[in-house]
Amino acid sequence: MRGFWRGPLSVLGVLAAAAAALWAILGPAHALALLAPALAVLWLRHLANLRRLLGWLEAPADRALPYGSGLWEDAYAGLARLLRQQRQSEAGLRGALERFQSATSAMNEAVIILDELDRIEWCNPSAEHHFEIDARRDLGRQLTYIVRQPQFLEYLLAQNFSEPFVLRGARGGETTLSIQLVPYGNRQKLVISRDITRLERLEETRRDLVANVSHELRTPITVIAGFLETLNEPNEPGPELRRRALELMSRQAARMQTLVEDLLTLSRLENARGPASERPVDVPAMTRSLLADAQALSGGQHSIEIARCDGPWISGSEDELRSAFTNLVSNAVRYTPASGQVRIAWRPSPEGGAVFSVADTGIGIEPEHIPRLTERFYRVDRSRSRETGGTGLGLAIVKYALSHHQARLEVESVPGQGSTFSAVFPARRTCEPAPANDVPQTVAA
Ligand code: ADP
């Protein structure tokens, strides 16, 4: 800065000295004739530089910075330095922004930035998905225009964001979102939303399970407690009543035991991602052994037969497969009136897999119940299920055991005529029989 005056002052000094010399020698008119054009040239030069600068300022991004001489050269050099620094910090900011955007784009959580009037400034792809926002169309729109629940507006206005807002029925009614607002900067807000639909469903399932188990246990416990009271009375009950009470109590105890066993089986199956083991299972032998079990359960009241038993071995867990097939067979016996028929089959499927099917001529199922049969404690015929010792968990167990083997359950039924339950296994689950010297997986009963 100190050098700033040196150049102009020396030019002015030279001009002044020349004008003074001219004044002394030739008079004031000549001195003026020198000074006026010289100053005009200087002034025009500055104007030309100023014009170039103003021209550049109109579109600094598109045009190159003009060159100048003298003082203007320094000014342009300073400007060029400033520009370089600005571009560097811009590039740094852009990089940081890009990193932030790509990090938030990869997040499952939705992120929205709201301005001080709660208008959307920016959002990540998950936010577009959660709130059905179209980033191009909805930027600048108020969030309350998109989330139209009055409770959400109240939440925003209350300005108390210590607890998240739970938005039920988002995205066409199916989704539940937990929305957390974080105020920052100048009354701006960061909106972070998580899809908690699965979590809510799990919570609901847990609540239902506790309610159902309590309900299932209530009857046997009430019966046992009632009889214990009777047996404890001071005037001794007669031997017949005592025998009857003990019989009923042990039946209820057995019922509770079955329920607990089924619950444990179900919980084991639910918690596992795949079958408990991956070994060749002799399903044809298992099928034959199931026939004997079914006949024992029926007590000779039904005609039970194996229609086909030419399916392959299956790779998986013998216990899980047996549990699934036993449930299907015992259901067929329990829901078929006396003198009805049950046909069990294990056959190759046309797609290269195999099908285990149990067809009965029993009571059948109305079509509206079929999609819900594998829900825990879902029963079409409540009293028949209980009378025959059902826990309402059998088909839930079947569902999990089959899904561990990538198999699916198919149900065909005609009310009053009978049902066919089929477990359809994919080709990749079939396997060659284990060599004869291996420990047998299934021993026919
Ligand atoms: P449950 O212990 O009550 O039999 P399941 O889960 O095995 O429970 O079956 C669920 C419901 O599906 C049963 O309560 C019954 O109403 C119906 N169901 C299952 N198998 C049959 C069948 N073979 N015929 C008619 N209804 C059946």
Image: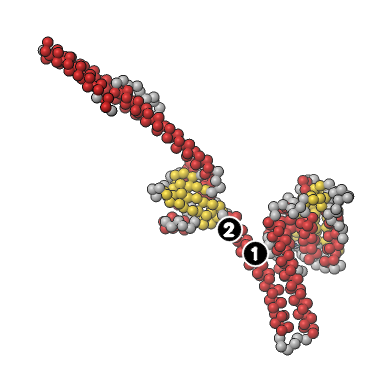
Identify the mark at residue 164; answer none if there is no mark: none
- In this orientation, which residue lies closer to the viewer: 132 or 69? 69
Residue 350 percent location from the top left of the image: 80, 46
**Residue at mark 1:** 209
| Left or right: 231 as drawn, with respect to 53 | right
Look at 85% across and 68% down and name the residue there.
Answer: 299
Q: Quadrant of ligand 1?
A: bottom right
**Residue 274 x/y as whole percent:** 72, 52
Circle 1 Cα neighbour tier, 10 Å, few/some/many (<14 / 14–19 / ≥20): some
Could you say whether the residue bearing mark 2 is in a helix, strand or loop? helix
Along the line of sight, which residue is nearer the eye, 43 or 338? Answer: 43
Display coloring: secondary structure
Up/down of 374 relative to 45, above or below: below
Most distant residue in the bottom direction: 235
The x and y percentages for residue 361 are: 80, 62
Q: Residue at (85%, 64%) from the top-left corner?
A: 295
- Please, what is the three-letter code of the amino acid marked with disc 2? Glu
> Mark 2 or mark 1: which comes first in sequence?
2
